[in-house]
Amino acid sequence: MSHVYLDHNATTPVDEAVLAAMLPFFRGQYGNASSRHEFGTVARRAVNTAREQVAEAVGVQPAQVVFVSGGSEANNLFLKGAAAFLRPAQVAVSGVEHPCVLRPARDLARQGWRLHTLAVDGEGRLEMDDVERALSEPTGIVSVMLANNETGVIQDVAAVAQRARAVGALMHTDAVQAFGKIEVDFAALNVHAMTLSAHKIYGPKGAAALILDKRVALKPLIQGGGHESGLRAGTENVPAIVGFGLAARLAKARLMELDSRLRQMQARLERGLRDLGAIIFGAAAPRLPNTTYFSFPGIDGETLVVRLDREGFGVTAGAACSSASPGPSHVLEAMGIEPELARGAVRVSLGKDNTPAQVEEFLRAVAAVVAEMRRLTAMAV
């Protein structure tokens, strides 16, 4: 039985064209991009090309692209790096951020900063009144993700950035889940920094970028040879960076066509799930076209995920990065979702190679598994 992959917010398969572009840099063109000989020059040109491709995809200059190992590193680099040059004040982050934003922010709170966790409503949207209240206090850093990795809810980052800039705060957005699914433009978002990752856009794991306003000073997390304009020491992962560059270019090129296909499949999926009695989280908010986060009252999410995997469908109970920390989703908790319903949460995240037929097959599998789980529950009562 072949499995159908429906967990693209966790990671994506590497595009064939991306893999082909990477392969030469594992073998014949294996030079260190800092070396002065021909092998190094070839590697440096490849890194420069990738930097230009990533920059073009989000509307910035190549010098604004800082290559790092992953979205978690990029988020930490900004939060900790910016804080090192600021007088401790308030750091404001939304309650639905990824742990790689929440935890560094909490760490800053142990170093003299005041942490304000921005509230969201029942759909997962930022409460702008709370943003206004937070920014009435001296604030140094604000970080709000562009699209949530669990619910897919899209935040009005530009509106938050306008308010943050008005009080002199630095504004960052984690755009890892948004990039490749919706239009992402650095200038339009009006932020000082933005995080992107390759493996969410059919590129390799191990490559990401912090897009940075060059007027912002950061203290590097990793010091050494002065790579990445002194912001990230270490020999560049040339194959992964090459793959990231091409993946970014391809993501930009296929955005409109992919959006239309994904939205059609998402609408059919959610209609079918509702017919079976599911509740869709964040349904009334603007969301990514590929993400559906749902729960069946009285059905355990982890058990449903395991049963669906046996039926040949790869989905997840929440975020892959949080799977080592069992318990209800902190995102749903911030939204005020009842713990019992939150424990049933399952996420489907569609990708470019999924088909309407696979959605229909998935709905049939869900119907059968949920009916059986309900029968077993009734028998146990």
Image: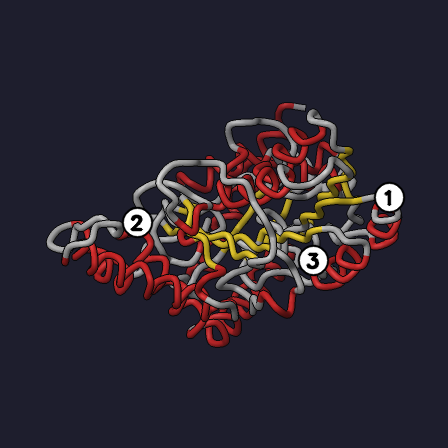
Observer-nearest residue: 175 or 275? 175
Q: For mark 1, give the secondary structure.
A: loop
Q: Position of residue 189 (x, y in %)?
A: 65, 65
Q: Earlier in the sequence, mark 2 or mark 1?
A: 2
> Mark 1 — residue?
137
Q: Position of residue 22 (x, y in %)?
A: 24, 57
Quadrant of residue 89 in the image?
top right
Observer-nearest residue: 222 or 262? 222
Real-space Cα distance between discs 2 and 1?
55 Å
Per the rendering, the mark at residue 225 is none
> Mark 2 — residue?
2
Real-space Cα distance between discs 3 and 2?
36 Å
At 73% across and 40% down in the image, what residue appears? 91
Observer-nearest residue: 119 or 258? 119
User: Would you say residue 125 is visible in this rendering?
Assistant: yes
In this rendering, would 89 be left or right of 299?
Answer: right
Q: For mark 2, give the secondary structure.
A: loop
Real-space Cα distance between discs 1 and 3?
22 Å
In this rendering, would 235 be left or right of 311?
Answer: left
Kind of residue at badge 1: Glu
Q: Earlier in the sequence, mark 1 or mark 3?
A: 1
Kind of residue at badge 3: Gln
Tag 1 and tag 3, C-beta contact below 8 Å: no
User: Would you call the spot at circle 3 few (<14 residues within 10 Å), some (14-19), or many (20 or more)?
Assistant: many
Kind of residue at badge 2: Ser
> Mark 3 — residue?
155
